[in-house]
């Protein structure tokens, strides 16, 4: 079933505009970060007036490989699965209305 949301079409448009702005800001932020990383010239810390302002260090994390576990021990994997219910709010873009 679906509900006609014509009355809130303006709100949906605002959400789409905000999503676009967020993406543009994230893209801009990534470019600025790349500029700073380049300015570090291989160093792992940057300072301004002697004060540390940027740390850019590589470290190793150990993470559980769920895919490998599932492939290696499918019965054990299934035994530890837990169902959960989630609600997602998704704005559907570029979809033509069905006539």
Image: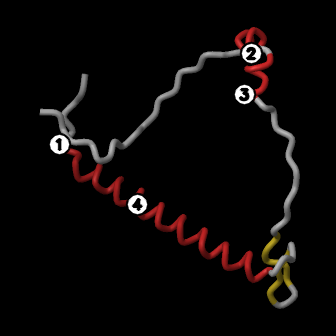
Residue at position x 23%, y 53% in the image: 10
Is 26 rendered above or below residue 89?
Answer: below
Residue at position x 21%, y 39% in the image: 5
Which numbered disc covers residue 77? Answer: 2
- What secondary structure is marked by label 2? helix
- Mark 2 or 4, closer to the camera: 2
| Residue hosting label 1 | 6
Is 17 rendered above or below residue 44?
Answer: above
Residue at position x 22%, y 48% in the image: 9
| Residue hosting label 3 | 67
- Mark 4 or 3, closer to the camera: 3
| Residue hosting label 4 | 20
Q: In this rendered view, identify the residue nearer to me: 9 or 38.
A: 38
Residue at position x 86%, y 41% in the image: 62
Label 2 and label 4: CA atoms lie apart by 39 Å
Of pointers 1 and 3, the one earlier in the residue sequence: 1
Of pointers 4 and 3, the one earlier in the residue sequence: 4
Measured as percent of width and height from the top left, residue 14 is found at 31, 56
Measured as percent of width and height from the top left, residue 45 is found at 85, 75
- Mark 1 or 3, closer to the camera: 3
The quadrant the C terminus occupies is: top left
């Amino acid at each position: 079933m679906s509900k006609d949301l014509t009355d809130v079409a303006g709100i949906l448009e605002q959400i789409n505009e905000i999503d676009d702005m967020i993406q543009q800001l994230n893209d801009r932020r990534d470019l600025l970060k790349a500029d700073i990383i380049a300015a570090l010239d291989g160093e792992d810390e940057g300072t301004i007036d002697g004060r540390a302002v940027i740390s850019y260090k590589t470290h190793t994390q150990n993470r559980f490989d769920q895919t490998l576990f599932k492939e290696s021990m499918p019965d054990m994997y299934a035994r530890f699965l837990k169902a959960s219910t989630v609600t997602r709010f998704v704005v559907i873009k570029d979809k033509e209305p069905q006539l």
